[in-house]
């Protein structure tokens, strides 16, 4: 029985990791063009809050999945803010909505922070993310 449980556990773990093993590929050229066009059409990518206060929130809430370097373990546990520049090219309203309501992307899930963080705290966290990871090279 113990052996059966170990085999079952191994199958469950390996099955849940299958979706995580794929590395995030670079966005298709059309996606890059859309992101560049979006920036040119008055997309708000300003800092909506206080990045200093946001650093504390990021460390408490976001760090476990997105990592200290913002790469989300190569995109396996969360969005890679560095490699996939289209993430932070989105409008503040879109990103704040994602933070508030969460995201489900295949096997990965970003939990909703509405009810955990105030609107001000979400803006502060987004400001920290934009300031810290928004301009880095791959």
Image (spheres, rainbow, N blue to C red):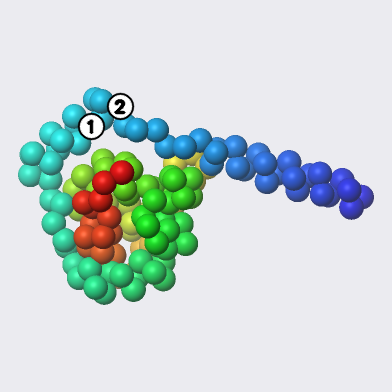
**Residue at the (47%, 37%) spot, across then down:** 23
Q: Is residue 126 left or right of residue 42?
A: right
From the viewer's side, name the closer residue of 71 and 112.
71
Q: Is residue 97 left or right of residue 112?
A: left
Q: Which mark is residue 28?
A: 2
**Residue at the (18%, 29%) spot, across then down:** 33
Q: Secondary structure at mark 2?
A: loop
Whether residue 53 is situated above or below residue 92 in the rendered picture:
below
Q: Which mark is residue 88?
A: none
Residue neighbourhood size for the residue with mark 1, other residues' Cα within 10 Å, grouped as few (<14), some (14–19), many (≥20):
some
Residue that sits furthest to the right in the current view: 1
Image-quadrant location for residue 46:
bottom left
Callouts 2 and 1 close, C-beta under 8 Å: yes
Q: Is residue 110 left or right of residue 135?
A: right
Residue 6: x %, y % from top left: 82, 49
Residue 57: x %, y % from top left: 34, 70
Cα distance in 3D space between marks 2 and 1: 7 Å
Image-quadrant location for residue 66:
bottom left
Residue that sits furthest to the front in the current view: 137
Q: Which residue is mark 1?
A: 32
**Residue at the (83%, 49%) spot, across then down:** 5
Q: Quadrant of the C terminus?
A: top left
């Amino acid at each position: 029985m113990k052996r059966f449980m170990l085999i079952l556990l191994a199958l469950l773990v390996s099955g849940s990791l299958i979706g995580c093993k794929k590395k995030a590929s670079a966005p298709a050229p059309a996606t890059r063009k859309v992101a560049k066009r979006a920036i040119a059409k008055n997309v708000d990518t300003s800092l909506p809050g206080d990045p200093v206060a946001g650093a504390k929130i990021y460390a408490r809430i976001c760090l476990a999945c997105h990592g200290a370097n913002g790469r989300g373990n190569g995109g396996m546990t969360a969005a890679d803010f560095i490699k996939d520049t289209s993430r932070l090219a989105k409008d503040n309203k879109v990103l704040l909505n994602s933070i508030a309501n969460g995201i489900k992307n295949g096997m990965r899930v970003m939990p909703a922070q509405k009810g955990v963080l105030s609107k001000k705290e979400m803006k502060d966290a987004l400001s920290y993310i934009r300031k810290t990871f928004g301009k880095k090279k791959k």
